[in-house]
Amino acid sequence: MLAYVLLSTALSLSTVLLLKLVWSYRFAAKIPTVQPAVPLLGHIPMFWNRTSEQAFSSLTYCFRQVDRLGKVLFGPVLLVFVHHPDLLQQLFSREDLHDRPFFYDFLGLGNGLLSERNGHKWIRSRKVLNPAFNTRMLTGFIPIMDGRARKLVAKMKPLAGTGTEFDILQYIGECTLEMAFSTTMGRNANELPGQKEYVKNLEMIMNLIGERVLNVNQFLDVFYRMTEAYRVDKKARTFCNAFTDKVIRERRRELEKEKGLPKARDEFQSKSLNFLDQILTIRKKDGSLFGDEEISNNLYNMMAAGNDTSSLTIAFACLFLAMHPEIQDKVLEEMNSVFHSDAVDITLDTLKQLQYTEQVIKEVLRLCPAVPCGARQTSGNQVTLDGIHLPPNQIVVFNIFTLHRRKDLWGADAECFNPDRFAPEATKQRHPYAFVPFSAGLRDCIGARYAMNSIRIVLLRILQDFEIKTNLRHEDFRFKFEITLKLAGPHSVWLEKRNKSV
């Protein structure tokens, strides 16, 4: 009898909860459901215990069914998929839609610029940190970037002309890492004991986060803490925290010592050109300084974003240029016309003259956006998309990877590599939100100009010395999601020495 009462009570409660859930999701009745969907479970089976490659494939499959709006159900959690530039423009243009959903907590980076969930707090931090990426700072970064790019070329020279295939991402990753260390922490990479271990652990953390975001069985902390992934994640974070804390403490002491030294006469020289010094000395609106935890979280954010996004884009660019030697020749011709002698310095102005090179980079970012997906969460204000009113705390997901491959936006050959899509006349005819590799609106990427400069400089130095070749084909690419977009296999190329005539 007692068992019957308990069972009846459980069924009654379940029915009430189910009806309450159905009632709360009535707003989405007209939004098409992505298929296949299982009763009660929704789309959980598609994202249960998947590898990062399988999960990315499932997510891509779902979004390709969506024209404007679609919905996906992870059991009781409903996600609204937005997949049209008209709707993205509405989302990105709003000044009250900067909150991020619960899975950004998986980053474990608290209030960093990339990971801060609260939109109001993010806006305040972004305004304070904007000066760290102004034109003066970017100008000061150029010699650092060029020095690292030249070092990269020197490391690859023994491979040129030997026919040896290698994963160029590994070499480029080391180069962009040294850039990130120098511009973020104000240190040369070889001056920091534990630097290689830091990078290895940081990459491990990012990989684990990517798998967790697309695996429903790891969403709840109580279950995630039972996994081997959690133990690896915790160990990696302990090392990275100790590393960044040490750098922060040492730099604080150095800045205290420098207070007593005579100040440089030139304002350009008197201000430090690295992110750590900026965030250590910048004051918030209330006059307070950033705390150690805030500084550490932002360093994590900048190191991960500044290194991974640039290195991946450069590596993908090398592959596409190797696949299309005629485009590679055209890029080199433009580079040689601008940098026709060693007397021509790399500056923001000379980099801007590489217009066709920029078209190539943008086409790479179209097909292989460094961060392929993103999400927002509605706040108290009403958000209306296609006549549908989204309630507060509703999660909205967008997919840049599939948006950039829509044939109705990019033509029947949307899967093909064609830099002419970004010629000035072609760009004018396109929806302004059809191409959003760095997101858009107020919550766009703070380091977009930094990334574009580093990509152009590294490509310049590589192409001046080497002709890039590969056996890979674009149609053979298999992607995986680890926060950033990565190939499931190596970025395999081989190099031939340039016969320099300029």
Image: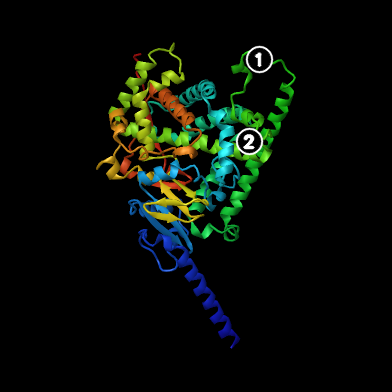
Tell me if 276 is positioned left or right of 492 in this view. Answer: right
In the image shown, does 245 or 159 lie closer to the viewer?
A: 245
User: Label 1 is placed on what type of residue?
Assistant: Ala
Label 2: how many Cα within 10 Å (few below 14, some 14–19, many 20+): some
Which quarter of the rendered picture does the N terminus lie within? bottom right
Q: In the rendered view, tell whether residue 19 sits above or below residue 447.
A: below
Which labelled disc corresponds to residue 288?
none
Which residue is at a point 63% across and 48% down the rendered structure image?
A: 235
User: Label 2 is placed on what type of residue?
Assistant: Gly
The image shows residue 231 at horizontal and vertical percentages of 61, 53
The image shows residue 257 at horizontal and vertical percentages of 74, 23
- The quarter holding residue 191 reads top right
Q: Secondary structure at mark 2?
A: loop
Which quarter of the rendered picture does the C terminus lie within? top left
Q: Earlier in the sequence, mark 1 or mark 2?
A: 2
Q: Nearer the viewer, mark 1 or mark 2?
A: 1
Which residue has dot 1 on it? 264
Could you tell me if residue 39 is visible in this image? yes
Marker count (numbered) = 2
Which residue has dot 2 on it? 194
Separation of disc 1 and disc 2 at Cα?
A: 33 Å
The image shows residue 230 at horizontal and vertical percentages of 59, 53
Check the image and name the residue furthest to the bottom. Answer: 1
Could you tell me if residue 201 is visible in this image? no
The image shows residue 487 at horizontal and vertical percentages of 41, 43
Question: What colour-coding does the image apply?
Answer: rainbow
